[in-house]
Every structure is written in structure tokens, then in C-alpha cells.
Amino acid sequence: MMSKQIIRTLMVETPSIPGNLGKVATTIGLTGGDIGEIQTVKVGPNYTIRNITVQVDHEEQIEELADALSRLDGGIRLHAVSDEVLHAHEGGKIHMKSKVDLQTLADLRRVYTPGVANVCRIIEKEPDKAKIYTSIGNSVAIVTDGTAILGLGDIGPVAGMPVMEGKAVLFDQLAGINGIPILLNTKDPDEIVRTVMNISPGYSGILLEDIGSPHCFEVEERLKKELDIPVMHDDQHGTAVVTLAATISACKSAGIDLKNAQVGQIGLGAAGLAISRMLMAYGVKDVFGADKSPDAKARLANYGGHPVDSIEMLMNTCDIVIATTGVPGLIQKQWVRPGQVILALSNPKPEIEPEVALQAGAAYAADGRSVNNVLGFPGIFRGVLNAQSSEITHPMLVAAAETIAACTKPGDLVPHPLDLNVHKMVTEAVERVAVQVNRKAEYTCSI
Ligand SMILES: NC(=O)c1ccc[n+]([C@@H]2O[C@H](COP(=O)([O-])OP(=O)(O)OC[C@H]3O[C@@H](n4cnc5c(N)ncnc54)[C@H](O)[C@@H]3O)[C@@H](O)[C@H]2O)c1
Ligand SMILES: O=C(O)C[C@H](O)C(=O)O
Ligand SMILES: [Mg+2]
């Protein structure tokens, strides 16, 4: 079974005779399609037209499906096949909008010149006032060099823009933050650091996204040192937060003692190394790691993890296995041990489909669509922006993970990604820790 990435909408007309919609559904099922939403477009005197969303593995299945539907008798007609995903991206997914009215000359003078000059002067005298009189206090740059776009690899920053726009949509709708994509035409760490430093005055946070390893480690570390605004590489720490949350939930449901469990991490790049570090910092004693790169394994050993040479061996010994390699189907079903927890987190396709892992005996299994850093980064940044914090610290990340785990329904691994209450709870948890950090800093400064 595959992850059915191709999504199409079929506009189908059926005469109003019981059983016709059933025939359509059966035809879709027989060609291997999964039915998603069904929306009634028009109810006629003796017919109904519906948009049916279908997910399939391959493009050719859509053609087979269209053929099969056109062969159905009794007046069933396929009117159109449309690509809603592509359609949703037409013209881009984001748009910079003004918050003020511009109807009259008075408006013009107020929001622009000459009124604006006085606001500039105020900020010149007291730069902190920019947080009050501009959007800077609520803006985060989403920075990519395009070197590790999802699991698609080094496809360049422009091809990665749909992902960056997606992150901006999530920032806006889940946390009310202006997320602004910044595409870098360089992969050189020195240039990345210099460029981000040079643009940083316009932002109150930097989200590094889909920057490949190992240069992502150096870039993040240097930017954290140089800048006095929060910097976070989402693929590292956002992913680690959500994975820790899913692991806590799985252990609770499966009765596994996380700290004494054997945890295996396959793929020790940006996501995998950060997940391993997070789990070890949380108290997990044994984290084993596999990667095709000896350097990646050496990095794990430096942080106290145990590198192993074979994925099969890791599968054979670990209670919890997490994979972030970007290689679909890497985990074979015969390697799955009964009762194991398997988080195959690569996007767009996992190392093993959750259904396959569960059929093979896994107690809990999930992929990167559900265990996804979308549950972490919006609330983490909202929390630090609210607290006007200059950094994102490890205790803030742990607070976020524990909050996500606490919001998870029994039997699930993580909450629904669009549950606004979860993002609010993450925000509050991070803000609480951030405020404590700020207070401590004030106290330290004053003594
Ligand atoms: N679900 C989520 O929230 C989430 C978040 C971040 C990343 N991811 C996914 O994780 C994957 C990796 O992302 P990343 O940013 O860590 O990339 P990366 O390039 O930094 O890391 C990938 C690592 O996998 C290793 N690897 C590749 N093929 C391998 C194989 N056959 N056997 C063993 N190791 C192998 C590479 O050597 C590298 O160290 C991507 O598919 C990405 O979509 C998911
Ligand atoms: O973008 C996502 O869906 C998650 C993650 O950042 C990834 O790179 O896969
Ligand atoms: Mg990413």
C-alpha cells in the first residue's frame, strides 16, 4: 500500500435512482481509489451532480477511473476531472494585506506621508517602539536555501516556495503571526548567516526551514549566537517537539516506560539528530541510530547516542522506532516486531505506511502527515513573541511537547493539527517558561 498522494476531484452526475452513487463508489474502490469529501453541486429534477474527491497512488489510475466511470450505464456521467491541489496554489497561497483604511486624503496623510515621518522619528529615538508602531513584533522570517525540501531533497528555494507559503498560512491561521518566506540563492553557510543577519531587523523571529544537514547545524548555531531574536530550525526542533509528544502518548497507551525503552532513530540528519538529542535530554537512556552517512552517526555518538550499522538490527531490538530519512518504503514489513511503536515521519511519503506497520504487528504507527511539526512551531513562536523573548530554550520546547501530549486523546498519538485550542495551550506553555527566563535575566542583570 502507498500513501496515495494524487488527489483529484471528479464531477459526477447520477440519475436520482437509489444505488447509483453506490455504483460510482464501488467503481472508485475497484480502481484502488480512496474517496475523500463528497460535495453536492446541484440537485436537478431527476439527477444530482456531485464533486467527489479521490486519492490514488498513480496518475494512470485517474485515467482508468475515468474510463471505468464512463462505461457505467444508467445515465451516470463524469463531467470533469480537476486538480484541486494545483488549483489551490494558483497565484500563490499568501498575500500581504493592509490593516488600515485608505479611502480619503486624510487616511493617506495618516498612514503615509507626512504623518508617518513622526512615527519614524519616535522609532529612531526609541528603537523598541518599533514593536508598538510597526508589524515587526509580529513577523517571523521563514528562511530556506531549498536544500532539503520535505524529502524531495535539494530542489532549490523557488521549487520549495509552496512549502514556505504553506508554513506562512499555518503561522497566520494557527497563531496570527506574519510568516514571510525568504528564499536564499546560496547554500554557503557564511552567506546564509550574513544574509539572515542583514535582514533580521525586520523580524522578531527566524524560522529556518528545509535547510539540509549538516550545514543546517552550523547555520542555526551561529544565528542563535549572533541574533537577539528567537531562531529555530523547524525540521530539527519543531519536529523533535512533536515526536517527543507522540512518543510520550504512545508509551502511555502501550504501557512502555519511555526513559528505559530502547529507542531507534533511522536517519540522523536535521530531524533525526534533533529527535535523538531531545529524547536523550528528556531522560531516555538508550537511543540507537542508523544512517548511511558515517559523519551523521559520529554526530549521534558525540551527543551520547549509540550508532548501529544495520537498520534491520535496529528494528529487531528497539521498542520505539522513528524514521526521518526521506526514503519511502525503507522499512520492510517483515522487520516490524509485534508491539513496536513506529513513527515513519518522512514527507511526502513515509518509510513504511502506518497501515502496513500495524498489519505487521506494530502497536502504534504514524506517518509525517499526522506527527508533523505543524503542531509545534506556530505556538512556540506565538509564545516567544508574546513574551518578547530573545531565544527559544530547551525547557520551552519540552513544555511545548508535554502540552501537545497532554492535549492528545487516549489512544491517539497527537491531537488534531487544526485544533486551535492546542496551539493556544502550546503558546501559553511556552510563554510561561519564556516569562520565567526573562525574569531570571532581569534579575541577573540587576545584581
Ligand atoms: N513529520 C515532520 O514534521 C517532519 C519534519 C522534518 C522533516 N521531516 C521529514 O524527514 C525527512 C528528512 O528530513 P531532514 O530535514 O532531516 O533531512 P536531512 O537531509 O537533514 O536528513 C536525512 C538523513 O537521512 C539519511 N539517509 C538517507 N537515506 C538513507 C538510507 N537509505 N538509510 C539510512 N539513512 C539514510 C541521510 O544520510 C541524512 O542524514 C524528510 O522526508 C522530511 O520531510 C518530517
Ligand atoms: O513541512 C512539513 O510537512 C513537515 C516538515 O517540515 C518536513 O520537512 O517534512
Ligand atoms: Mg520541513
Image (tube, helix red, strand yellow):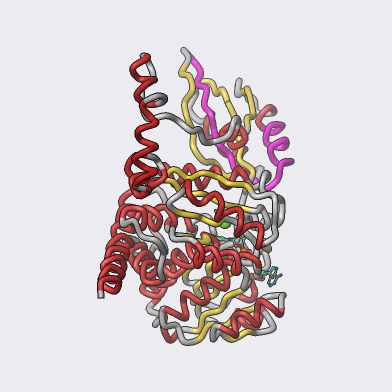
Task: Judge whether 282 appears above or below 209 on screen.
Answer: below
**Residue 66 colored in magenta in the image:** yes
Q: In the image, 118: left or right of 165? A: left
Residue plotted at (25% across, 71% down): 446
Residue plotted at (34% across, 47% down): 126
Q: Quadrant of residue 443?
A: bottom left
Q: In which quarter of the image is residue 132?
A: top left
Q: In the image, 256: left or right of 49? A: left
**Residue 187 colored in magenta in the image:** no
| 205, 113: nearer the viewer | 113
Residue plotted at (61% across, 81% down): 314
Across and down, in percent, residue 31 comes to: 66, 43
Q: In the image, 83: left or right of 276? A: right
Task: Judge whether 320 appears above or below 371 on screen.
Answer: below
The part of the chain drawn in magenta is 46-68
Across and down, in percent, residue 336 comes to: 59, 75
Q: Quadrant of residue 353?
A: bottom right
Residue plotted at (42% across, 42% down): 172
The quadrant the N terminus occupies is bottom right
Q: How many labels does the image show?
A: 0
Residue 1 visible at all: no
Q: In the image, 36: left or right of 135? A: right
Residue 261 visible at all: yes
Across and down, in percent, residue 422 comes to: 33, 54
| 279, 194: nearer the viewer | 194
| 125, 275: nearer the viewer | 125
The quadrant the C terminus occupies is bottom left
Quadrant of picture, ligand 1: bottom right
